[in-house]
Image: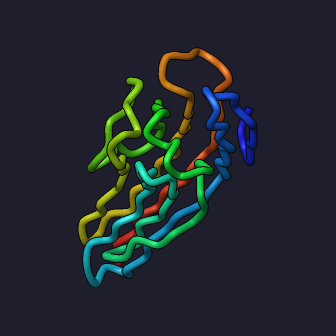
């Protein structure tokens, strides 16, 4: 499943609502500087976009935010290889995780991330979103 997913998980007295939305994140610099496009899930339950030097809030992916540390993420990538980010392995969200493309001047990099989140120690349910990244520093 992909897109917006919400679920109530009965975690020992602290249920969490998980929300992941498909996103399209792009940075276009017209060859004037490097371009950066990225996605971030924080250990405080926020999902952010990275556009150039700015990090902007997109949504709360885990409510209550204190439950975010009880989740892990698995990311696969198609397209351009990432500059930053763990892929192809379950990674704890007890630490903020970032996936980013950095395009040098003259480059146009495009990647699609498949982001899956689940509670640590479980195999389901999982919540998935598709994140399209475009870092374009072309002329």
In the foreground, 4 or 31: 4
Colouring rule applied to residues: rainbow
In the foreground, 81 or 23: 23
Work out whether 13 lies above or below 133: above
In the foreground, 9 or 49: 9
Q: Which percent across, then down, holds residue 130?
A: 61, 45
The quarter in which the N terminus is drawn is top right
Q: Does residue 138 appear in the picture of this structure?
A: no
Q: On the rendered structure, is 120 left or right of 9?
A: left
Q: On the rendered structure, is 2 left or right of 79?
A: right
Which residue is located at x 26 percent, y 72 percent? 34
Q: How many marks?
A: 0
Q: Does residue 32 appear in the picture of this structure?
A: yes
Which residue is located at x 68 percent, y 44 percent? 17
Which residue is located at x 74 percent, y 36 percent? 8
Q: Which percent across, then down, holds residue 58?
A: 57, 66
Q: Which residue lies furthest to the front in this view?
A: 13
Q: Which percent across, then down, holds residue 9?
A: 69, 31
Which residue is located at x 41 percent, y 48 percent? 43
Q: Dividing the picture into quarters, in which one does residue 2 lie?
A: top right
Q: Which percent across, then down, holds residue 20?
A: 64, 48
The quarter in which the C terminus is drawn is bottom left
Work out whether 133 lies above or below 34: above
Work out whether 88 lies above or below 3: above
Q: Dividing the picture into quarters, in which one does residue 55 lie?
A: bottom left
């Amino acid at each position: 499943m992909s897109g917006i997913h919400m679920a109530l998980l009965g975690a020992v007295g602290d249920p969490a609502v998980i929300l992941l939305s498909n996103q399209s994140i792009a940075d276009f610099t017209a060859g004037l500087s490097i371009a950066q496009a990225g996605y971030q899930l924080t250990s405080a339950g926020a999902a952010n976009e990275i556009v150039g030097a700015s990090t902007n809030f997109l949504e709360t992916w885990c409510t209550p935010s204190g439950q975010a540390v009880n989740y892990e993420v698995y990311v696969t990538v198609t397209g351009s290889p990432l500059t930053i980010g763990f892929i192809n392995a379950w990674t704890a969200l007890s630490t903020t995780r970032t996936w980013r493309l950095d395009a040098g001047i003259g480059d146009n990099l495009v990647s699609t991330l498949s982001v899956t989140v689940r509670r640590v120690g479980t195999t389901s349910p999982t919540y998935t979103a598709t994140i399209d990244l475009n870092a374009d520093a072309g002329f």
